[in-house]
C-alpha cells in the first residue's frame, strides 16, 4: 500500500469548478483519484472536468446546489452511477456576504448559514450510507481562519466556519466506528474569486494579508492540494477530528 496513493478512489468535490475546490480536485487527481465536480455554474464545471480529465483520471461534472437536499442526494447517486462509489468528500462549496453585522437582513444571514453550514452537513449526511457500506471513507471540510478569529464584516460567515470546525469533530467522533475519518482544513487568505470580492470591498486587504502572514504572500489554490491528499489517503488513517491550518503561518503569529 502506498501511503499517498489515491488510485481506485472516487472523490466528490463540491465547488470543485474553481478556486480552492479546483486546486484540491487537481491534487486528488494527480494522486490518482477519479473526481465528481459539483457546482451550480455548468460552464465553469465543464472547464474543470476538461482540466481533470487531461490529468489522466475519470471526471464528471454534476449540477448541484448544496442548499437543496434533493440535489445533494442526486449528486451522490449520480457519482455512484458514473464512477462506481464514493470514497472521499471534499465539502468545499461556500460563499460570503460582507457587511456590518447590524445591517444583515435575516434572509442574508440564512443564505450564508444554509450554504456554508447546512450545505456541509447535507453533503456529509448524504455520503455517509455509501461510505459506511464500502467499509470507510474520508471527509474533508473547509473551515477558515474565521473558524478561529472573528471578522467584523463577515459575522454569519465566521459563525458558519466556527460551526464547520465543530461539526467536523462531532462527525469524526460519531463515524470513527464506520472507519470514516472527518477532518477540517483551515485555509489562510487564498487568491480566488471569493477574495477578489473581499479585496474590492476592503482596499487595504491585499497588502495587510501579506504583512500579517509570516510567509509574506497570499496562498494559491494549489497550496491546499498536499494537505487534502494527506487527509484523503491511507497516510491519515488514524487522524480524525482535526483542524489543519494551511495558512503560511497566519494562525500561529500574533503579528
Ligand atoms: P470561490 O468563490 O472561488 O469558489 C466557491 C465555490 O463554491 C464555487 O466553485 C461555487 O461554484 C461553489 N458554490 C458556492 N455556492 C454553492 C452552492 N450553493 N452550491 C454548490 N456550489 C456552490 O471561493 P474559494 O475557492 O475561495 O472558496 C472555497 C471554500 O474555501 C469556501 O468554503 C470558502 O469559504 C473557503 N475559504 C476560502 C478562503 C480564501 O481565502 N479564498 C479562505 C478560507 C476558506 P458555483 O458558482 O458553480 O456554484
Image (cartoon, helix red, strand yellow):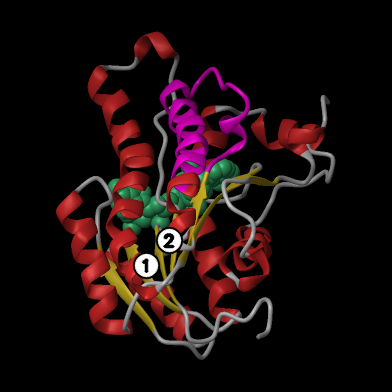
Q: Secondary structure at mark 2?
A: helix
Q: Does mark 1 have its CB less than 8 Å from ligand 1? A: no
Q: Which mark is residue 113?
A: none
Q: Is residue 215 left or right of residue 241?
A: right
Q: Residue 56, relative to residue 138: is it above or below?
A: below
Give the label, 1 or 2, closer to the camera.
2
Crowding at dot 2, Cα within 10 Å, few <14 / some 14-19 / many 20+, comes out as some
Residue shown at 29% from the left, 63% from the top: 129
Image coords of residue 141 (percent x, y) = 49, 50
Which residue was labeled with disc 1?
131
Classify residue 12 by image quadrant: bottom left
- Which quadrant of the view contains residue 119? top left
Residues 10 and 104: in front is 10
Which percent across, then down, holds residue 82?
A: 27, 83
Q: Earlier in the sequence, mark 1 or mark 2?
A: 1
Residue 147 in the magenta stretch? The answer is yes
Q: Is residue 194 visible?
A: no
Q: Is residue 199 above or below residue 238?
A: above
92 lies left or right of 67:
right
Q: Which residues are magenta?
A: 143-171
Q: Which mark is residue 178?
A: 2
> Marks 1 and 2, how far apart in space?
8 Å
**Dot 1 lies on which element?**
helix
Amino acid at each position: 500500500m502506498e501511503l499517498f496513493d489515491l488510485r481506485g478512489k472516487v472523490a466528490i468535490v463540491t465547488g470543485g469548478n474553481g478556486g480552492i475546490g479546483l486546486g484540491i480536485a487537481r491534487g486528488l487527481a494527480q494522486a490518482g483519484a477519479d473526481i465528481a465536480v459539483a457546482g451550480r455554474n455548468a460552464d465553469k464545471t465543464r472547464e474543470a472536468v476538461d482540466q481533470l480529465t487531461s490529468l489522466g483520471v475519470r471526471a464528471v461534472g454534476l449540477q448541484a446546489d448544496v442548499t437543496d437536499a434533493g440535489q445533494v442526494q442526486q449528486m451522490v447517486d449520480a457519482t455512484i452511477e458514473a464512477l462506481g462509489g464514493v470514497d472521499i468528500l471534499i465539502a468545499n462549496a461556500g460563499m460570503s456576504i460582507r457587511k456590518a453585522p447590524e445591517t444583515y437582513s435575516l434572509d442574508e444571514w440564512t443564505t450564508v448559514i444554509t450554504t456554508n453550514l447546512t450545505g456541509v452537513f447535507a453533503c456529509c449526511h448524504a455520503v455517509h450510507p455509501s461510505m459506511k457500506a464500502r467499509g470507510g471513507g474520508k471527509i474533508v471540510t473547509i473551515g477558515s481562519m474565521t473558524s478561529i478569529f472573528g471578522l467584523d464584516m463577515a459575522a454569519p460567515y465566521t459563525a458558519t466556519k466556527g460551526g464547520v470546525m465543530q461539526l467536523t469533530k462531532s462527525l469524526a467522533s460519531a463515524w470513527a466506528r464506520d472507519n470514516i475519518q472527518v477532518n477540517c482544513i483551515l485555509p489562510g487568505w487564498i487568491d480566488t474569486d471569493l477574495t477578489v470580492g473581499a479585496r474590492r470591498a476592503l482596499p487595504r486587504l491585499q497588502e495587510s494579508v501579506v504583512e500579517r502572514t509570516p510567509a509574506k504572500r497570499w496562498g494559491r489554490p494549489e497550496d491546499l492540494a498536499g494537505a487534502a491528499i494527506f487527509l484523503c489517503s491511507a497516510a491519515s488513517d488514524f487522524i480524525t477530528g482535526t483542524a489543519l491550518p494551511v495558512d503560511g503561518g497566519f494562525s500561529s503569529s500574533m503579528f
